[in-house]
Amino acid sequence: MSNQQSVAVLGGGSFGTALAKVLAENGRQVDFWMRDAAQAQTINQQRQNPRYMKDLLLPAGIQASTDLATVLAGNSLIFVALPSNALRAVLEPVAEAMRGKYLVSTTKGIEQHSFKLMSQIIEDVVPEAHIGVLSGPNLAGEIAANALTATVIASEDEGLCQAVQAALHGRTLRVYASRDRYGAELGGALKNVYAIMAGMAAALGMGENTKSMLITRALAEMTRLAVRLGANPMTFLGLAGVGDLIVTCTSPKSRNFQVGYALGQGTSLQQAVSELGQVAEGVNTLRALKEKADELGVYMPLVAGLEAVIFQGLSLEQVIAKLMSGEAKTDVDFIPLQGFAE
């Protein structure tokens, strides 16, 4: 794998923009791909992304382009920051150009029906690539504003982890490595669903105890499913698990939190998503997650409740009441307590 200084970022949204800025500030030449020619032209001429983070001044080291083939040909380290529903359509026509390269997925979502994570889709499309996942409590606006941030690069490929750390690690961004790609990515995808519920709880003025309970039980549900699917439960105690869950469920800057807050104020789902103007991956993930939990028989009452709120018309108060009246359980599933309820 070459040690070239040029890096590619695919996807002209908020997170792609934040990544491109950090990489350029770290001295890398960034080939920044997007579909929209007018958007690319404005970035190159005015150093601003007109659709996302429009007040952010981008460094000169970023070159926006709509020529995907050329961008891929010139780079061996590629960050994929595409919406989950566009991933296959964008990558499949150029799969051959990504063979043997370092591909880093940054999208936190799950494909409908297949229940595949984004890195698994990339693996389907480009099986000969080296694949990793970037995940953690990483709000795009704060990364772009150089707020102190930590993230995780998860991959079985040590060379890929080192390449990403060398490219991203800097004065305000610390990059940790993990070998549990699946667990790190699953944590990033699942927490989006619970952020919607947290936003609703905030809009309804629920207490701090209630919000803390929801976040903690969300972590229990996430870990329960992840272990059933083969992930390491310890991964969920780190940045890609509890760290990402906390920031997404407590920050008004989170897109999924914003959707939930709007729902809590009585806005319809369609209107809430439309007003946001960006993808809230938790909406795409919710139904797939509910189907998988039912299929595997994994106890996930918050997921079932939120699905009932959004798609069946229940209120969040009804969901929480059902949670409170459920059978008593142990606090942490993976600590054996002999003689206690399982």
Image (spheres, helix red, strand yellow):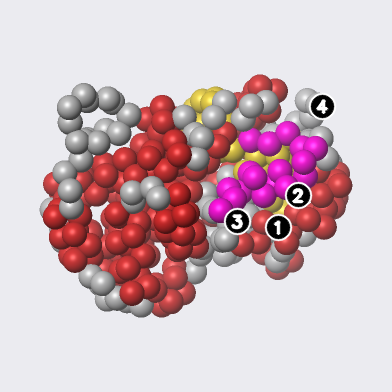
Q: Which amino acid type corresponds to the residue marked 4 in the rendered image? A: Ser
Between label 3 and label 4, give the one nearer the viewer. 3
* Side of 202 where 140 appears, left or right: right
Cα separation between marks 1 and 3 = 13 Å
Q: Residue at x 38, y 40 (%)?
A: 224
Query: Residue 2: which numbered mark, if any?
Result: 4
Packing grade of label 4 (10 A; few <14, some 14-19, many >=20) is: few
Q: Which amino acid type corresponds to the residue marked 1 in the rendered image? A: Arg
Cα separation between marks 3 and 4 = 34 Å
94 or 41: nearer the eye? Answer: 94
Considering the numbered disc 4 on the image, is that residue within a helix, a strand or a loop? loop
The verdict on residue 126 being magenta is yes
Which stretch is magenta? 115-132
* Side of 282 where 203 appears, left or right: left
Q: Residue at x 83, y 40 (%)?
A: 99
Among the 4 quarters of the image, the one containing residue 307: bottom left
Cα separation between marks 4 and 1 = 26 Å
> Label 3 belongs to which residue?
114
Q: Residue at x 86, y 47 (%)?
A: 96
- The disc, 2 or 3, on the residue closer to the chain's N-terminal end is 3
> Label 2 belongs to which residue?
125
- The disc, 2 or 1, on the residue closer to the chain's N-terminal end is 1
Percent coordinates x, y for residue 65 in the rendering: 76, 56
Cα separation between marks 4 and 2 = 22 Å
Percent coordinates x, y for residue 259 in the rendering: 37, 65
Among the 4 quarters of the image, the one containing residue 161: top right
- The disc, 1 or 3, on the residue closer to the chain's N-terminal end is 1
Q: Is residue 62 above or below residue 38?
A: above
- Is label 1 in contact with label 3 (beta carbons under 8 Å)? no
Q: Residue at x 32, y 29 (%)?
A: 334
Percent coordinates x, y for residue 260 in the rendering: 33, 63
Res. 253 visible in picture: no
